Image (cartoon, helix red, strand yellow):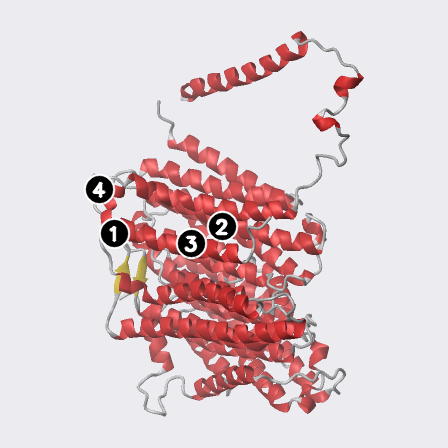
């Protein structure tokens, strides 16, 4: 049984859209961070899925571009979350809130 | 699959900066252990010890940056044009990457010097600062030589992550927290969008390297076009082009000023260079459509940046909108897309570095007592109290406005000429028109400095490191105003020729 | 084409049915005889003094952040380990260079006291 590429990409696009909507509409910072993770993982899914389409070169050698890319993204995403949580912690220390609307000193 | 050996020497500039980051990180730990042994150290001694450690770290990071710049230029002089990467190129070392590496190194170096007295003045003299700054610089070195989506993404993240932390470096100040938070959230969304665009481009073309993408792109197709749009949007965010500019004013205002200066010049340079390389290498055939898209972004940036800057009463915020406007001017060059335009863009970035570092250095020289002096009122009557500072500030602002007799004028001039040659008349009209508007807000500060009475009375002195930076920037602006194409001292180097050679990376 | 997913769907259905079923069996068949002593907290005979549902200390997040980064970096060690024989010496040097910043980071956070609870 092989899953057609359209299905993989549809799932990935769906995940990405859920992530975008979550990141743009939710007000809880942790949830926003999770939405961003969702977007990154949607991209990962697309990369790994597309790798199945482009799995051999013209000369017949195996290619792993998409999978290698996805590995890199996993590591980068962890670093990104670590920095994000660090920023979050320093904000919580100054102001006991996790709501983005409370961060509104800077306007216009 | 046999792993190939590759030329590690190609990574020397990157290596110097990365090792420098690790060394400064550990140096701070070792030095502060030695300085703070024993519980009974009083705060005063602690502060002095911190200041000393800060100076040592600043010297160490300057050394790392200078070595990196030297290595990059030395390799280039040796004719060391090489592509780095096992199996296929990830990084391309050529005239463009050398030029951009030198430019970014210079921006980082000046920012380090700015920080020496600024960090103690704001009481945020922590050693991690220099390590983060160096790491971000390393990321930009990767970015400017990236010829593959993977190295582009890694470089971009390595550039951005330390800057998110740096923007929030003033941990006890709520505005700084907020700037970091906003920059992080929007930046993370932008890089996720960029990444998804890359995934789509890969899916459409089957390649992650730029030249492979250009081969696979033939004819376009929905998948490739949407991927392309997402990639351009993600990169446009980094260089703060309208409509992806919303973070700019908040982050410029909230971040410590030395960080603002750093990211204003270096991230912009790196972002524009990588965009240039991507457009030229990956999309040589898409000329017309992409140029229209870039033209729209350019026009919007110039209009919104300049109009919004008029109503600001915080200097850093005004400069942020001015940065958006300048991003728009640079995008005019991108819309033109001829070799002359690329030359003009690179020369503009070069001049922009001195103007921007200079203007933020003046803001830094005013900071004292744990607070910034960055509202327009804080500049009132500055000319009577610190005339030299007011004079160089005026020079930098005139240059940003692009008034003849400054390097800013020459930069804009070359850009306009290249754009007219490429037939982008509408954009040039917008450029000239909005530049007129910009006189209004740039000249507001000199008026306040020279015409009004001093209200507050800060007794801050301009420190010697700040004097060096200010003198260098002012000298560069005056020099390149008259000798952009000439060589009065017989050094054999003409600024515009160097930019032209860098822009020639295609052939 | 979608019928290819039937197996996945079936698996999902069985999983849900099994879980819900076992919970229901417990609810309906389990004997329920509650009296005072049984409902009281039994740990060492002490009344609880704080709610167990309070927030975690911020320190917990700090350790979690540090853990996440080092944990995920291991993602690069697996491919290297799997291809150790093929990549040989270049692979070994590369992974050694890769480890240096990680070690420096660890030493740094250690000496900064981030690992002290």
Disc on the earlier residue, 3 or 1 = 1
The chain under label 3 reads C
Residue A58's disc is 4
- Chain of the residue under label 1: C
Choose mark 3 or mark 1, whichever is in front: 3
Cα distance between the residues tagged 1 and 4: 27 Å
**Residue lying at 32% horizontally and 63% vertically, measured from the top left:** B11
Q: CA distance from mark 3 to mark 4?
A: 41 Å
Which residue is disc 3 drawn over?
C103
Q: Are the numbered discs 2 and 3 placed on the same chain, yes or no?
A: no
Q: Mark 1 falls on what kind of element?
A: helix
Q: Of the residues tagged 1 and 4, which is closer to the observer?
A: 1
Residue positioned most to the right: C36
User: Relative to residue B443, is residue B506 drawn left or right?
Assistant: left
Numbered tag placed on residue A79 in the rendering: 2
Of the numbered discs in the image, which one, if any, rests on residue C90? 1
Residue C21 locus on image (x, y percent): 59, 12
Residue B301 shows which numbered tag?
none
Of labels 4 and 2, earlier in sequence is 4
**Above or below C20: residue B284:** below
**Side (left or right) of B453 relative to B265:** right
């Amino acid at each position: 049984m092989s899953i057609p590429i359209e299905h993989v990409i549809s799932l990935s696009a769906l995940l990405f859209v859920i992530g975008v909507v979550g990141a743009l509409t939710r007000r809880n910072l942790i949830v926003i961070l999770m939405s961003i993770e969702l977007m990154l993982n949607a991209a990962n899914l697309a990369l790994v899925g597309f790798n199945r389409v482009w799995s051999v070169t013209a000369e017949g050698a195996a290619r792993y571009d998409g999978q290698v890319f996805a590995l890199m993204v996993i590591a980068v995403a962890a670093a990104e979350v670590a920095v994000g949580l660090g920023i979050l912690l320093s904000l919580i220390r100054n102001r006991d809130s996790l709501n983005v609307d409370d961060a509104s000193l800077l306007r216009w | 699959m046999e792993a190939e050996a590759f030329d590690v020497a190609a990574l020397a500039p990157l290596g110097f900066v990365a090792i420098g980051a690790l060394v400064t990180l550990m140096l701070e730990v070792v030095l502060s252990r030695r300085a703070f042994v024993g519980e009974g150290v009083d705060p005063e001694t602690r502060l002095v010890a911190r200041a000393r450690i800060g100076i040592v770290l600043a010297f160490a990071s300057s050394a790392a940056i200078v070595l990196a710049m030297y290595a990059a230029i030395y390799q280039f002089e040796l004719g060391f044009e090489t592509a780095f990467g096992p199996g296929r190129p990830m990084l391309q070392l050529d005239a463009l990457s050398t030029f951009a590496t030198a430019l970014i190194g210079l921006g980082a170096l000046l920012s380090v010097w700015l920080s020496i007295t600024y960090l103690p003045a704001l009481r945020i003299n922590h050693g991690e600062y220099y390590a983060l700054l160096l790491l971000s610089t390393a990321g930009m070195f990767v970015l400017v030589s990236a010829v593959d989506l993977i190295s582009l993404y890694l470089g971009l993240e390595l550039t951005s992550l330390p800057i998110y932390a740096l923007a929030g470096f003033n941990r006890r100040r709520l505005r700084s927290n907020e700037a970091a938070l906003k920059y992080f959230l929007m930046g993370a969304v932008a890089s996720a969008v960029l990444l998804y665009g890359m995934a789509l481009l890969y899916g459409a073309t089957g390649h992650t390297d730029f030249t492979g993408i250009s081969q696979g792109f033939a004819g376009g197709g929905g998948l490739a076009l949407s991927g392309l749009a997402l990639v351009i949007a993600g990169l446009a965010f980094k260089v703060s082009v309208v409509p992806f500019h919303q973070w700019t004013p908040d982050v410029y205002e909230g971040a410590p000023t030395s960080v603002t200066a750093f990211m204003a010049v270096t991230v912009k340079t790196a972002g524009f260079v990588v965009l240039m390389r991507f457009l030229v290498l990956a999309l040589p055939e898409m000329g017309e459509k992409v140029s229209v898209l870039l033209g729209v972004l350019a026009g919007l940036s110039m209009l919104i940046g300049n109009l919004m800057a008029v109503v600001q009463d915080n200097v850093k915020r005004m400069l942020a909108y001015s940065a958006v406007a300048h991003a728009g001017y640079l995008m005019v060059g991108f819309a033109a897309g001829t070799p002359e335009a690329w030359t003009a863009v690179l020369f503009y970035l070069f001049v922009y570095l001195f103007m921007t570092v200079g203007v933020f250095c003046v803001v830094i020289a005013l900071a004292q007592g744990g607070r910034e002096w960055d509202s327009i009122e804080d500049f009132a009557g500055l000319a009577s109290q610190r005339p030299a500072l007011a004079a160089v500030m005026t020079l930098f602002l005139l240059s940003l406005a692009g008034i003849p007799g400054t390097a800013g004028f020459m930069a804009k001039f070359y850009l306009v000429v290249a754009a007219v040659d490429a037939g982008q008349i509408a954009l040039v009209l917008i450029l000239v028109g909005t530049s007129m508007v910009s006189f209004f807000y740039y000249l507001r500060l000199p008026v306040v400095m020279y015409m009004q009475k001093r209200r507050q009375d800060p007794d801050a002195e301009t420190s010697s490191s700040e004097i060096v930076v200010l003198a260098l920037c002012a000298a560069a602006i005056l020099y390149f105003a008259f000798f952009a194409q000439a060589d009065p001292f017989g050094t054999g180097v003409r600024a515009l020729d160097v930019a032209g050679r860098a822009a020639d990376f295609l052939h | 084409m979608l019928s290819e997913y039937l197996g996945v769907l079936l698996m999902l259905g069985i999983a849900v049915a099994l879980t819900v079923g076992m919970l229901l069996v417990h609810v309906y068949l389990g004997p329920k005889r509650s009296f005072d002593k049984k409902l009281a907290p039994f740990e060492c005979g002490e009344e609880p003094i704080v709610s167990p549902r309070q927030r975690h200390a911020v320190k917990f997040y700090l350790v979690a952040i540090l853990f996440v980064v080092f944990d995920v970096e291991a993602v690069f060690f697996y491919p290297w380990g799997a291809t150790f024989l093929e990549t040989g010496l270049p692979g070994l040097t590369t992974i050694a260079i890769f480890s240096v910043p990680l070690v420096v980071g660890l030493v740094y956070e250690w000496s900064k006291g981030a690992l002290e609870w």
